[in-house]
Image (cartoon, rainbow, N blue to C red):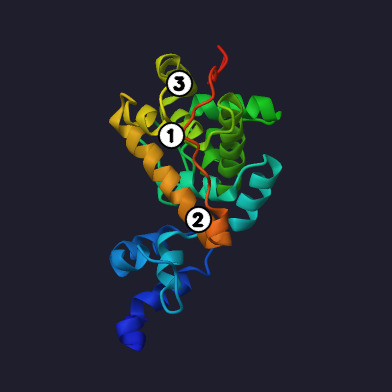
Amino acid sequence: IRAAFGARAEEALCRLYGQLDTARRRYQIAQTAVSWTVLRRAPAPGTEWQVSCVYPRPYDDVVQREATRHLLPSAFVYGVMRQESAFRPSVVSPAQAVGLLQLIPPTASRVASELGTEYSPASMYAPATNIAFGTYYLKKLLGFFGGRLELAAAAYNAGPKAVSRWLEKGDSLPLDLFVARIPYEETRTYVYRVLGNTARYAYDERGPAALPRVELEIPAGLRAPDDAY
């Protein structure tokens, strides 16, 4: 490919890998093939390949089906997936979180029970199962926290009980200050990046009108139940 396409080899590779369902290799190529200056502007003819290379949509049929089933924005699912696994279905974290949406075994087991299906650790490596379990869990977190994407993202990273504790003393703050005061640097960064990913995916899907609105006022009393996981 590089010999055949010369200066446009990176574009050719991104487009060819885009024909595969997985996005792992495409996303890896994007890290050196895509210009940051391009990403700071709206997509234009000749540069749209760079955006789709950095923000791919693997397993789109599965993501759209599960997002529709759980009334989730598909942009949010992809925003979490991009941050969690960089689209690597076999990745395992130091905390033993597995797959595209990085589910830890206790969470996956609880989700399986609520879905009425058998839990198998090996099944979490299967993209369709991992996406189905992860979207179900994201829907639960959104239900705990009033549909707020930023709070659900924080809970996905740090746990719903931690977010509930932070809200006890912080739900009177504007959202930007609340997030800035999250005591875990990893979670603060996670929230910013997931929301940024989500905004980019929404914009690329339907244009500026699709950008998520971020309300600075946090509704009072949002808490996860005692048995939240």
What is the CA distance from the residue labelled 1 to the residue labelled 3? Answer: 29 Å
Q: Quadrant of the N terminus?
A: bottom left
Q: In this view, does 41 lie to the left or right of 59?
A: left
Q: Where is residue 140 in the image (x, y as percent from the top left)?
A: 60, 29
| Residue under the image location 46 percent in, 78 percent down | 45
Mark identifier at residue 58: none
Q: Position of residue 15 (x, y in %)?
A: 46, 74
What is the CA distance from the residue labelled 3 to the residue labelled 2? Answer: 28 Å
Q: Tell whether label 2 touches label 1 (CB within 8 Å).
A: no
Q: In this view, does 175 lie to the left or right of 74?
A: left
- Label 3 sits on a secondary structure element that is loop
Residue denoted by label 1: 97
Q: Which amino acid does label 3 sit on?
A: Asp
Q: What residue type is labelled 2?
A: Tyr
| Residue under the image location 35 percent in, 75 percent down | 10
Choose top left, top right, bottom left or bottom right for residue 167: top left
What is the CA distance from the residue labelled 1 to the residue labelled 2? Answer: 24 Å
Q: How crowded is mark 2: few (under 14 residues within 10 Å), some or many (20 or more)?
A: many
Residue denoted by label 2: 201
Residue sitting nearer the eye, 102 or 145: 145
**Which marked residue is nearer to the observer: mark 1 or mark 3?**
3
- Label 2 sits on a secondary structure element that is helix
Q: Which of marks 1 and 3 is nearer the N terminus?
A: 1
Q: Position of residue 64 (x, y in %)?
A: 64, 52
Residue denoted by label 3: 171
